[in-house]
Image (spheres, helix red, strand yellow):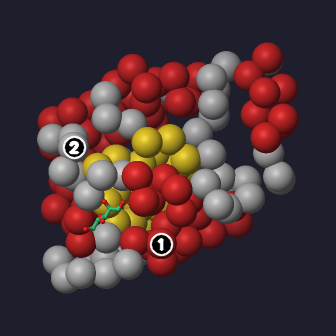
Amino acid sequence: MKVAIGSDHGGFALKEVVLAYLTELGHDIHDVGCFVNESVDYPGFADLVCEQVVKGDADKGILICGTGIGMSMAANKHAGIRAALCSEQYTARMSREHNDANILCMGERVTGPGVAEEIVRTWLSTPFEGGRHQRRIQMFSTL
Ligand code: RB5
């Protein structure tokens, strides 16, 4: 799967962990940054990842900041993006089954590396259920 990933400085260390894990799983990864642990503004990185997903250059996106909150807020401003902030496996699974989330957000200051890997594995491998959930998504979608 083609996965775009981005973070700010608050999510940089966890992004490195997730990148290594995605590589191990054999995904085709596009890292949009940040590339050094210096203070940066998270909305720019959210935009870069969302643009890749909306254009179809990536199948899914992963965004990481300190809490995951800013990234999810910025990502959900994009038409066609359904970003889910997850801190455990259950919501990661449900965000795919019921919400067809196309961006996963996590917070490095909230979620440890082991749980983050579990979330990523579940989120990338869980299909959307469609049916009544498709109708509900269409009710709030702009694309
Ligand atoms: C950066 O300090 C922090 O505000 C950012 O990573 C994120 O948590 C914002 O929601």
Q: In the image, is 135 to the left or to the right of 29?
A: right
- Residue 13 position, x and y percent, is 16, 62
Residue 110 - label: 2
At horizontal 39% and vertical 37% (from top left) the residue drawn is: 86
The mark total stands at 2
* Nearest to the observer: residue 142 or residue 34: 142
Residue, x 67% and y 62% (percent of image)? 78
**Res 86 visible:** yes
Mark 2 residue element: loop
Which numbered disc flags the more N-terminal residue, 2 or 1? 1
Disc ID at residue 43: 1
Give amino acid for label 2. Answer: Val
Picture layout, residue 72 above or below residue 48: above
- Dot 1 lies on which element? helix
Q: Quadrant of residue 15 in the image?
A: bottom left
Q: Are there few (<14), some (14-19), or many (20+) residues within 10 Å of tag 2?
A: some
Horizontal side of 25 relative to 115 (left or right) equals right
| Vertical comparison of 93 with 47: above or below | above
Query: Residue 1: percent from the left, percent from the top?
Result: 50, 48
Label 1: how many residues lie within 10 Å, few (<14), some (14-19) or many (20+)?
A: some
The spot of residue 128 in percent (x, y) is 64, 26
Name the foreground residue: 126 vs 28. 126
Circle 1: residue type: Pro
Q: Is residue 109 left or right of residue 93?
A: left
Q: Whole-percent x and y of residue 134? A: 78, 27
Which quadrant of the render holds ligand 1? bottom left
Q: Is residue 89 above or below residue 52?
A: above
Figure check: 55 above or below 23? below
Give the residue displayed 83% in from the left and 53% down from the top: 143
Q: Name which quarter of the figure residue 40 lies in.
A: bottom left
Q: Quadrant of residue 7?
A: bottom left
